[in-house]
Each structure stands twice: as C-alpha cells, then as structure tokens.
Amino acid sequence: MLLTITTTYSPATDLGYLLHKQPGTVQSLQVAGGQAHFFYSQADRERCTAVLMVEVDPVALVRGRRAGAPEAFGIGQYVNDRPYAASSLLAVAMRRVFSTALAGRSRERPALAGAAIPLEIRVPALPCRGGEALPERFFGPLGWRVEAKEIALDEAVPSWGLSQYVDLSLYGDIPLQDALSHLYVLLPALDDAKHYWVTDDEVDKLVRVGGRWLATHPERQLIASRYLAHQRSMAESAVGRLEEMGVPGPGPADAQPLTLSGAGGRSLAVERRAAVTSLVQELGARRVLDLGCGEGALLQDLMRIRGLTEVVGVDLSSRMLEMAARRLRLEQMSDRQRGRIGLVQSSITYRDARLRGYDLAVLMEVIEHVDPARLAAAERVVFGYLRPLSVVVTTPNREFNGQFLGLVTGQLRHHDHRFEWSRAEFRAWATRISSTFGYRAQHREVGDLHPEAGAPTQLVVLRRADVGSEASAEAAHATG
Amino acid sequence: MQLDRGADAELRELSIPETCLVALVGVSGSGKSEFARRHFPATSVLSSDFFRGLVSDDENDQSASPAAFEALYFVASKRLAAGRLTVVDATNVQAEARRALVKLARDHDVLPVAIVLDLPLSVCVERNRSRADRDFPAQVLHRQADQLRRSLRQLEREGFRRVHRLRSQAEAESAMIRYRPLLNDLRSEHGPFDVVGDVHGCADELVALLVSLGYEINWDEEGRAVRGHHPAGRRVVFLGDLVDRGPNTPGVLRLAMGMVAEGTALAVAGNHEVRLARALRGRKVAVSHGLAESLEQLEREGPAFSAEVAEFCHDLLAHYVLDDGRLVVAHAGLKESFQGRASARVRDFCLYGDTTGETDELGLPVRYPWATEYRGAATVLYGHVPVATPEWLNNTLCLDTGCVFGGSLTALRYPERELVSVPAGSIWYQPARPVASQVAEPSDRPPTEVLDITDVLGHRVIDTKWLRGISLRAENAAAALEVMSRYAIAPDWLTYLPPTMAPAPSASGRQQLEHPTAAFAAYRREGVTDLLCEEKHMGSRAVALVCRDPAVAQRRFGGDGSATGALHTRTGRPFFDAGLSQLVLERLGEYIGRAGLWQELNTDWLLLDCELMPWNAKAEGLLKETYAPVAAAGMAALSASVLELQGASALGADVEDLISRTTTRRRNVLAYREVYRRYRWDTAGIDGLRLAPFQLLASQGQTYEGLPHLWHLGVADRLAACDPQFISSTKRLVVDATQDKSVEEGVAWWEGLTESGGEGMVVKPSRNLTVGRRGLVQPGLKVRGVEYLRLVYGPDYLDPKNLDRLQTRTVGRKRSLALREYALGMQAIRLLVEDAPLWKRHQLVFAVLALESEAVDPRL
C-alpha cells in the first residue's frame, strides 16, 4: 500500500524538515502487519514527494489471529486486498512514521509546521466502501480539491464494471499536520474495515486526532460511525464529545438506512409490530408463536401484553435466538417472566411437536424469505400440522415498491426476499390456504395507505374454520 | 398370575419376564440389597438408600426420601423406556410406594413383578443391629412387618403380574432367577415369511394367493382347504381380520387354523377376531360390521368347529416381533415404544390403531397417522385400514388392499419385500367409506414434511457401513438447519452431498506446496498402489439427479411433475433457476438416452457426480467480491510503488531490493489475475456451460462405488461423445505407485496439466471405494497446481518465506472430515437405492452439511 505527499512550497525540500526525514535515504521499520518504508521519490526546490510504502505480510496477518476462532476461517484470509489497499494498516504506519509531524512539531521549521502550504496527496489504491462520492464528501469540506479516478475491477471483463477502489488525489493549501490528521482519520473511515478490534480507547484517539476539524465536519456522524467500526454507543459518545467542542449542526442525511415511514412518523417496522400486537389482543390469544422471530423485536412487544400467558419465539438461526435472548435480557428475568417466554430453534419446513396447540402463530415478514419451491412444505407444516387457532401473516406489497420506495422495477426490498407479492397475489394465496386447510381469511393493510398502490405492508388473519363457527353462526342468527 | 407358595427351599426358580420392573418387598434388614446383588446385574438395581445418598449425602436421611424417590423413578423410567430390566430395591411395604411402581411399569408397558423377602422378624432385627450405620428402633421394624403382612394378599390386586415370596434366608440364597421371553417375542424366527393382509372371509382369494405364492394346499375329503405348506419352508403370517364380512369365514379359519397348528403359519389377532371370540363365548357384542355373516356361517359348521374357532381367536396374540427384531407384525400397526411390550393399551393399539378417542362424521374412530412419525428400525407390517395400493412409509407398510370390498388380497414376501396379490372375485361387502390412501393428504406420495425437527437437531451418532460412531455435534446441526432450510433444494430431491476432499500432505523441501509424490506416498502407506490420476476441472462441484421423464421424477422423487431431476451444489443449493436447471437436465437426459445407459443400467434415473464449469456459473459473486478486487488493488498500488521507487533510486537511495521485491509482487498479481481469468467465461443460459461427470453414484436399485474409476470415466466419455462442447471428458493416467518410472510419469503428467493452466489432479484408488489395512481409505487426494494455488494462498505464496510457513499446514482434520463425509454420502446413496425412509436418508445428507460447519481451514 502506498501514500505520497508532495509539496510545491518553495523550497519544496523543506518538507524534509516537517517530516523529520532527509532525502536520499530509506527508513524501514517494523509496523503492525508488516514493514513500512519511507523515502523520497523526488526532491528539488520546486517539488518534493515523500513516499510511505507498507509491505504487508499476508501470512502473518492470518496467523496472528486467535486459532480456532470462526473468523479465522474464510477464503478471504490469504486472498485479500490488505497488502495493497490503503486501510487502517496504513494509518497505523503513518502514526509510527509521522508521529512528530502529526503532533505539529518541527525543530528546524517551527513556523512552517502550522502554516498552510501547497500539498498534493496521492493514494493510488483507496477502497471506498459506499460509493465514489464519499471522498468528496469527506475531504471536500476540509478544503481539499478531490480527484478520485475510478479503477476498473478487471479490464478484461468489462461487464464487471468498476472496482470499489479509486486512485485518490487531493490538492490544497493546508498545514501538513492537518493533512496528516485528515488522512489518519478518513482513510480508515473510507475503507470501513478495521484490521483490529475497536475498543473504547479508539474514541479517545479519534477525538484527540480529529477533534479540531471533525467537530464541525458535516459528515462527522458517518465518519465517527465508520471509524469506530459501527459500534453505535461508541460513535454516539464520540459525536457527543465532538459536538461539545464545536458547533452542533444537522446530522448527515445518509447515516440512516432505508426506512419506510408509517403513520405518525413511526417507521414501518414499528407500525407493523403495532398492528400485530393489537391484533393479538383483538383475537384474545393467550399462547402465541412468533415464527421467524429474528432478534426478538416483536417478542419484546408481545411480552408487554397483559393476558398473554406464553410467548414463544421460533427461529432457524441459533445466532438470532442468542441475540433475542440478549435483547429480552432473558438471563435477568424473574422466574415469572421467564415462564411466559420461550425461544426455540426450529424450521417451518419440519414438523415440530413442541409448537402444536397454540392459539396464534405470527409470520411477520417471513414467507417472502421462503423459497417458492419450499413454500408448500411450510404451508403444510404451519396450517396442516401445527394448526394454531389463528395465523397472522404479513408480507411486503410489491405494488408499493417502484414509485414510492425508489426501487427500480423488479427490485425487491431485501436481497434475501425470494418473492414479493402484489395484493392480488397475496389474496389468492390466502384464499387457497383457507380452502385447503380450513381457515377463514381477513385482510388488512399496514402503513400509510396510497389510493393506487395500497399500503406498504399487507396483512392477513387466518382463523380456523372449525373452531368458534357455532358461536359466529349464533351471532349471525341473532343479527339476522 | 400365581402366588408361589414356595414350599421347597432347595431350589427356588423365580420366573420373570425378560423386560419387567421388579419390586423387591421386605422390611428393613430382610436382605433385599444382598439379594439384589446376588441375583441381578448391579446397574439394573436402583436402591432407595443409594438415591438418598445421591441427593443428601446421607443414605439414612429419611427426610431426603421424597427427592430420592423422584430421582429413582426418573432413572427407572429411562431404563424402562429403553426396555431394560429394572429392579427397585426399597422396602416397598406400603401400598402407596408399590402403586407408584405399578404405574411406572404400566406407563412403559412392561409387567410389574414383586419378589417378597418375607423373613422372620428376628433375622431382620439381628441384621439391623449388626449394621453400624443404621439403628432403627425395634418398633419401626415391627410396624414394617405389620405393613408387609397386610400387603401380601394385596399384591396381585395391585397389579403385580407375578409374586414370588421367599420365607427364609436359605430360600433367598438358593433362589434362581429364570428370565422368560414374552410370548410376542419370536425374534429367533427368521422366516422367510409371506405376510398376508386382511382376508375377511375371502377363502377363494386366500387359496389363490397362497397358490401363487407357491404354497401347496391340502384338502379334506369334503374338498375344503385345511392345511398348506411351502416347499421352500416359507411361512405365512396372517395380519388379522381373517373373519367377517366375506362369503366364507369358516373356510378361511379352517385353513388358517390348520396352518397355525401345523406351524406353517403365524397369526395375530384383528379386532374382528376379538369380537368374534367374545360373541362365540356368549358375551354381548354389537352384531354389525359383518359379524352377523360370520356367526351365521359358523352356525352351519356345527358347535364343535365354533368352539375351536372361539379358542383360536381368543388365544391370538396382538403382535409378534420377528427376525432378530427386524420385523414387527400387528393388525393395525405398532409404534416403536410399544414393540415387544405387553399391556392392555399395547394390545389396543395393535387391534385398533392409534385412536384419538374422537369419531368422524361417519361415526368411525379418528386415527392418528402414527406411521408418519414412525422412526423405528423394525419394519412394521399391518392391515386394518384398506388402501388402494400398499406404499412404504417410514419402513412401514399396510397390506390391507380391501379384498372383501372388491379390491385385492395382498401378501408381502419378506425379506424380499416383493408384493404379490390376487384380485377379489367380487365386491363382497360395501365399504363405509371409499378405499383410499391411508395418508391424509391428497397426494400421490407422502409429503416431505413427514420430516420431523427431531430427525435432524441435537447431538447424534451415526453408524455407516464403512465408518461407525460418526458424531455430530448439536451446534453443527443447528448451523446446518439454517443452510438446509433457507438455501437447499427440497429434501426428497437432495439425495446426496459430496464429501470435501483432502489435499495431499504438504510437499516439504520443495518449491511447491502440493506435489504428486506426496499423494502417491500417502496411498502407498495405506497399502494402495494401483492409482488413477484424474484431471481436476476448475468449476464447481455439482450433483445431477437425472430422470428419464417428469413422470418418473414425480413417481420416484416427488415434486409437482415439472422437473426431470435436480442439479445442486455441494451444499445442496440449486445452481440455476428452475428453467435453466431443467434445460441442463433435459440435455443430460437426452445424452444418457443416446449413450444407451437407460437400458444398459436397467434404470430410469441416474445420480451423477460432476464438475460444472465455468467457475463463475456459481461463483460470479465470489470472483467479483473477493478475487478480482485483490488484483485491481494490487495492480494500482504496486504499479505506483514501482514508479516511486525508481524516483528514489534516481535520488541515490538504496532501494534496489525493494524495487526487485515490488516488481516481483507486481508480477505475482498479474499471474494471479491470469489464473482466475482462465476459469471464467461468459455464458448465456445454457450456452457456454460445461459439465464434466466423473462418477456414477446410483441408479434404480444399484450403487457403483465398487466399480473402478476407469469404468466411470468410460461412462462419462460416452456422454461426452454426444456433445463434446457441453460434456467435458476427464483426462486420466494410471499410476503404479510401486514403480518409480510410473510415478515419474505421474509427476510429469501433473506438471503438463498444471503448466497449461489446469487446476491440478485428483489421485484416487483405481478400484474406487477401498478399505485398507487401517480402514476406509481416502476416496481421493487433490494435488493442485503451482499457479492455481495463488487463488488459495494469495499471489505471493511462493515467496520462500511464505512457502516455508505454509508448508507447516496440517491436513489431519481435513482428512478425517473428508473420510467421515465420504462414509455418510455413500451410506446416503445406499439407503437411496434401498428405498429407505426419507427421514433416514435426510439425516445422512443433513449430517454431511453439519460436518461442513466444522471449523476446518477452507484453503485445504
């Protein structure tokens, strides 16, 4: 990996005093992950270029990991871009090689150390996860003119298009210390893949190095979040500390993932859970299954409902169930609380006797993750074998996708969705289920209703036809 | 039911059933523990003293008794569920204590037995006094003795099926336990059998069926069939409901009774025999369901015959366990936990099935489909509910084909598993409901969700023919559940998953990481020297299940009839969408037909192990996200680095080493890029796809692991000849590992293959599946090419300081994993051709996937 710093300040060779290295020599030292080399490739009055090159030892990078840890496996380990792409490894090397310059000290040229000088920075292979516009958004507000040349993934395979790397050049009249601190913070943030485990002292490091300029940077939230490996609590603490130092401004527009809003400004996910929980109460269910409970957001809501004696979260993934247990604080629950909740690993394409005999099963945003070829099996298990008194199913309404969510035609809302149904398709499905398995369907819509496209989420309640039919027949007689 | 009075103290033989719960009864100090030690295996004895010690550290702490007994009952129930003799060593002088034991025995459908140590009180007092750890006041013993005395007469009434009473020390010491098998235990009878479904008075059809099965029938002077025997010594097993509804119940009974008496037939009771017996013995029964006809027909035969019939029907057992436990026969079937057990509810299950107590709209009892959940090892044959055609479900088969309703009378030859049937002569009786498949769902085949979550989740130990005790950890199964449920094709189409393949041991002291000589040497160490080197195609492992037409596919493997097979990856994912997959399968099917393989192998489906190319057909994402970026970043960074270094050199810095190293690294990245480019090319639908089959796994009734690899490649060549563009042939070379010259040829061949861009080769034992001196031998060892390995270990792996470190890699885990997966896969194939139940086959395929989640270095 490579970084060059060029100045056209006159005399340009004064760069040597700022960096505390003299031209004509090579300085090599051991850094995390390999060896760093520092040298000049050009050094005259008009132009002086300092070069930091890191030779990464890919084998050591892999072998250094804890043995047996799952992340130690993965083909990407030896075959990865870390030896070449600018990353946190480069930032670590910068800190070692430029420690004095980063601190803004120069014995020979103390005045120049704080002065804006004409600088050109080049990073020939910079990974930019999240789009080529990011370098401009990150470096632009700091006074840099940004040139990001796109690099093809493989020129022999034009259909693959561009790689995520850019050949980055920055131009500006900026004090060297600032330039180095910009790079130190922003290169890893652009790369967005730290080579080490981020701990709390990273927050200190970020505030210390970037504090002066990051506090007022319009993208500070995104930068902090990416620099701190998306650990939300750390990013919040960093941004909080930064904002105390600077002027708080509006948060960045893109820090939020795609969310749909429902009525009253609530997110669609919240809206959906509210719809399901109110249905649970309406149906008078006491023992409820949440099939495909994921991280347990709905379970948390269901637990609050008075009169629910048993809530069971079911998921395919044991990892999800662990997350749900953490979210629900299962460990800390009293026995009485714990008696109301269960977490079960299972699959709706297998029969599972543990899940029979419940009042209600919720399939919230689940069926669209089932392969169409396996859907029939899932139907037979849920409606034919488990046979809860009621089943609530929610699924995206495809008609809502295009014009309202900004998705291109045919694009689905989630990469794992195997299908998304129109309202007519969903109704047809519910009708077939009802007649095959003896249920009665009642449709609802969730989220802001659009006159043509309907609501973003569609919902159906299927009630067993053989239960409570006499009661409803009586009711019909009474009213008729 | 007898109360032994036990007069002779010389040699008391205490007869008890092989599986039962024995309650020792006696006051403290009567010598129960001593008796148990002397007469029963130590692990079968559960002593209340011991359990008190377990829960309280004090065997005499009476306050610990409730907890101790709870634990004791728990252990006892585990033993009884497993069918193990269980002896409870407690005083058991109180009725409540014994009631709990009788209930425990009944819950597990075993017989409770009491052995009473009714010794003189003085002996007990004396013995208690001599025990240092115990000092019961005398009144406790007196009270116990009093309770015992009052108990003695109660025991039978309480439900103990056998009570042995020992009255003296001498009697207790000289007693002999004699284990008696249950009457239903005919495990020593190995057949062969011809198992006949419900006859219901269809005498002519029965005779016709027996004749077509090869039996010779004996007739009496009145021309009635009275006996029959098979020249090859086969025996008939009647599954019950011989009687009622049909035209000639006496005729059927005469023949069946004759054969049973002579030992050429066995019979179990049907519900109709039970009712007939009760009617004939003058008990009140509802005369319906065809019983009236039987009574009327029997009346014409006279009272003597009727009396014989009454006795015969009354004495029939409800089920038999035959052939070392491999076969169970019962009129309405029998679930696993009831097999070989004896209780009223076991008998009810045998006679009436798994009734829920509900009745349907016709007033007929609602039955639970026990066979869908059946997971037992024994084959269960039964009748009772007529079906249109017998269909295996989880190793159970209903043989009632509704003869009396105008269907047919069917027998199963066992162990051959061939069905033989004769049509009904007439519709003798109108059924209450149409004869239908016993499976509730309106489907031709049992639906796949007969699979139960307990079939796959949790810790499991699997035995295969070649490798026993393969242990699957619960967390691996949990991981596999996600992959299987979210990504894999339907279980009935997922017949097999290929094993991972181990590389040859690292070639230390060489310029390469992998080298053929290491593979040859590894096989030589196992005593395998006749080897075949096969070109390793660089694509993705593919399993192709190809049926002759959609109808075959649906009949044999299920589905909706739109596909002629399945094409999946080594983790069970489909390669393509249904349309493209079908195109590939149809083309493959066409070539199989053109090569004449359907006829030659006498099959209408084939399972093939293949490699599918190009690599990007499956792994385009991997190429774009992992492989190509490395080259893109590498070229950008290293090209710029070389330029900067040249500038430094011009300034007089000593960077020659750095320049040379960086230039080499740049060359390495270029070479790396060349490798992956070679294995990718554009495809459009089926155009550009290539398939290289290299092994035939299975066809109807046949597996092929015993045929040499050259035979398999010969088959592949015939397919390739049909369309060399689409089907790639596999290059090969025979190597004799004992001959230096042959080994050298092998090395040279590998070098030629890999220098021209090949991935490498796989070295296999020529004869295919091989069991060597140390057990199952690796089915293949891969030897990958020098250039190819850049994709695995990075562009710079050949740098001596990298290579040195990489050569220390260990392949032991990978080899062990490969072997386990291989054994599981072969077992899955064996079960497939044997038509084993889906759950059993799925367990093996699932096991391969579970093992794949073990943490093993994926670069190997």
Image (cartoon, coloured by chain):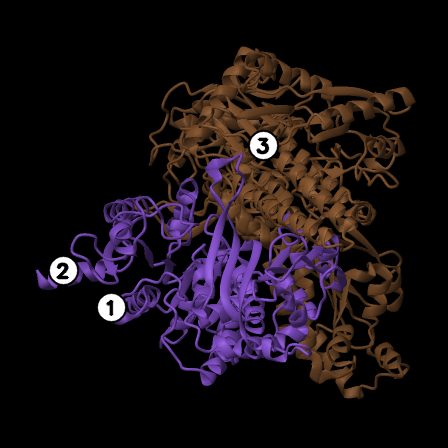
Chain colours: A purple, B brown
Nearest the camera: B650 or A242?
A: B650
SS of the residue at dot 1? helix
Left or right placement of residue B339 versus residue B527 in this view: left
Callouts 1 and 2 in the same chain: yes
Q: Which mark is residue A476?
A: 2
The answer to whether residue B267 is seen in the rendering is yes
Mark 2 nearby-residue class (10 Å; few <14, some 14–19, many ≥20): few
Q: Which residue in the protein does label 3 denote? A: B542
Mark 1 nearby-residue class (10 Å; few <14, some 14–19, many ≥20): few
Callouts 3 and 1 in the same chain: no
Q: Residue at x 44, y 61 (%)?
A: A136
**Quadrant occupied by the N terminus of chain A:** bottom right
Mark 3 nearby-residue class (10 Å; few <14, some 14–19, many ≥20): many
Looking at the rendered structure, the kind of residue marked 2 is Ala
Q: Which mark is residue B313?
A: none
Where does residue A339 sit, x and y in percent of width and height?
49, 74
- Front: mark 1 or 2: 1
Looking at the rendered structure, the kind of residue marked 3 is Ala
Q: Which mark is residue A263?
A: 1
Sequence-wise, which precedes: disc 1 or disc 2? 1
Which chain hosts label 2?
A
Q: Residue at x 91, y 24 (%)?
A: B738
Question: Distance between the Cα atoms at labels 3 and 1?
Answer: 49 Å
Which chain hosts label 1?
A
